[in-house]
Amino acid sequence: MDFLTILLGLLLSLTLVHGLQLLSTKSKKLPPGPTPLPIIGSLHLLGDKPHKSLTQLAKTHGSLMCVRLGLINTVVVSSAAMAKEVLQKQDLAFSTRTIPDALHAHDQFKYSVVWLPVSDRWRSLRKVLNSYIFSVNRLDANRHLRSRKVEELINYCRRNSQTGEAVDVGRAAFRTSLNLLSNTIFSMDLSDPYSDSGKEFRDLVWNIMVESGKPNLVDFFPFLEKIDPQGIRRRMTVHFGKMLRLFQDLIDERLHQKPGKSRKDDACRDVIDVLLKTSAENPEEIDRTHIEHMCLDLFVAGTDTTSSTVEWAMAEALKNPNTMKKAKAELEEVIGKGKLVDESDISCLPYLRSFVKGTLRIHPPAPFLIRRQAEQGVQVCGYDVPNDSQVLVNVWAIGRDAETWPNPLEFKPERFLDSEVDVKGRDFELIPFGAGRRICPGLPLAVRMVPVVLGSLLNCFDWKIENGKELDMEEKLGITLAKANPLRAVPIPL
């Protein structure tokens, strides 16, 4: 069979599938959206910044919009009211995830609490996360670890301030987040704060974010799965493999420790001790494979998102010197100039908390919440959402919605000072961590860590852009929304 025959057969099959889809949706009242082209649908409208192009399309077609992407019906949510409908009022109907082809690497989707459907296994893993990692008691017990890592970050910046050398803010914050997590889970640093030893790990995490965030033809045309035409799954297999081998080695090392070295007291146990003990006593709750994949989830989701938020917050501080001045004045008044911020101080620093909320509004860690799926046909606000449709919640658009936020592009922490709006999933105009039963389990750690790091950086130094360069606020998109050009700023001694 020659190439031309194969190509003609493929085009005929696609045309047939397209015709069947039109027939299956003809009787349904779909949400409004752009008229799809044959076969490719509206893929040509996405561009390289889909969060922006879908925001523009929503201004024409509405905040509940149906977009055909290849062979996949995609419903895009772009307002707080519609997000509430999907994530709260019909949370169960949209609780399943659409699995990207890239997540088939090392069967990550079968073991990850992020991708598993709501089920007994999913509930067990969420319970493990909520009880042993992100509970108030566990976070309080590990507070000294976070304080030590923030102190190391400030000492690193202080050394640079003495030489006038710029700090790569995102990279420094990444090392802090990485070592915080590695100490919480394994009682060890994975990066030296005074060298670039964490660069390989950071590049690995970013590569995973980039591959996960790339538009993948397989996700729009599932019949291409075996071909993997862009090689995304192949590269993800390599990246995941490197991380899983690291975690396997660390777990093996712990299992082979001499009994005298193990931590008997529960208060002294790190996360891996607790997980291995739980696995030994209740293997049906969590096993060794789930532990390894949970570590992969934690390190990928918990390092880049935190460091990116700190970097954007510092960029906004430098771009808006009056807001930085107000934040520094509050810090000086409440805790004293030059001191590190402690977690117990956060409740007494309303402007700092508002500063973080303002950053998360304009620069959410991920522009889209992780994709949901309608397993069965469901109605939303009088429109039909067909079964197997994927649902994208555009939190980037929601945070910049002029109907909710006056002057939405203005960074203005003051808008949160007399507001009850918070990031914990109850206020749908600000949901950077999601909402409902699939809200990000790491939220309790993030709301402690980001203000402490940001407040300490602002309170211990004055800051200026390296070489007086113009501040660049361009974005680059993986799953997370990072600065296109790293923020390099010089810490100035007080």
Image (spheres, rainbow, N blue to C red):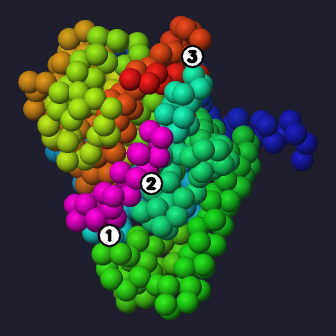
**Residue toward you, 254 or 262:** 262
Residue at the spot 33% in from the left edge and 83% down from the top edge: 265
Query: Is residue 144 a member of the stretch shown in magenta?
Result: yes
Q: Nearer the viewer, mark 3 or mark 2?
A: 3
Q: Is residue 425 left or right of residue 195?
A: left
* Residue assigned mark 3: 466
Residue at 43% x, 50% y: name it.
Answer: 149
Residue 432 left/right relative to 200: left
Q: Is residue 135 magenta?
A: yes
Which is nearer the eye, 468 or 206?
Answer: 468
Mark 1 or mark 2, which is nearer to you?
A: 2
Q: Is residue 110 above or below residue 81?
A: below
Whole-angstrom CA distance, mark 3 to mark 2, is 27 Å
Residue 62 lies, in percent from the top left, at 29, 20
Q: Looking at the picture, how far across and down is residue 157, in whole percent? A: 50, 34
Residue flagged by tag 3: what amino acid is it? Glu
Percent from the top left, x then y, of residue 93? 27, 51
- Residue kind at label 2, given as amino acid type: Leu
Q: Are marks 1 and 2 in contact (CB under 8 Å)?
A: no
Is residue 466 visible in the rendered structure shown here? yes
Residue at 53 percent across and 69 percent down: it is 292
Please provide percent x and percent y for residue 340.
Answer: 32, 40
Other-residue count near label 3 (Cα within 10 Å), few / some / many at <14 / 14–19 / ≥20:
some
- Which residue is pictured at 46% across the width and 62% down the height? 183
Report how far apart the C-alphas of labels 1 and 3 lie in the structure: 42 Å
Tell me the element at label 3.
helix
Query: From which residue to which does the magenta span run?
Result: 132-155
**Residue beneath disc 1:** 132
Looking at the image, is mark 1 or mark 3 nearer the viewer?
3
Left or right placement of residue 314 versus residue 385 in this view: right
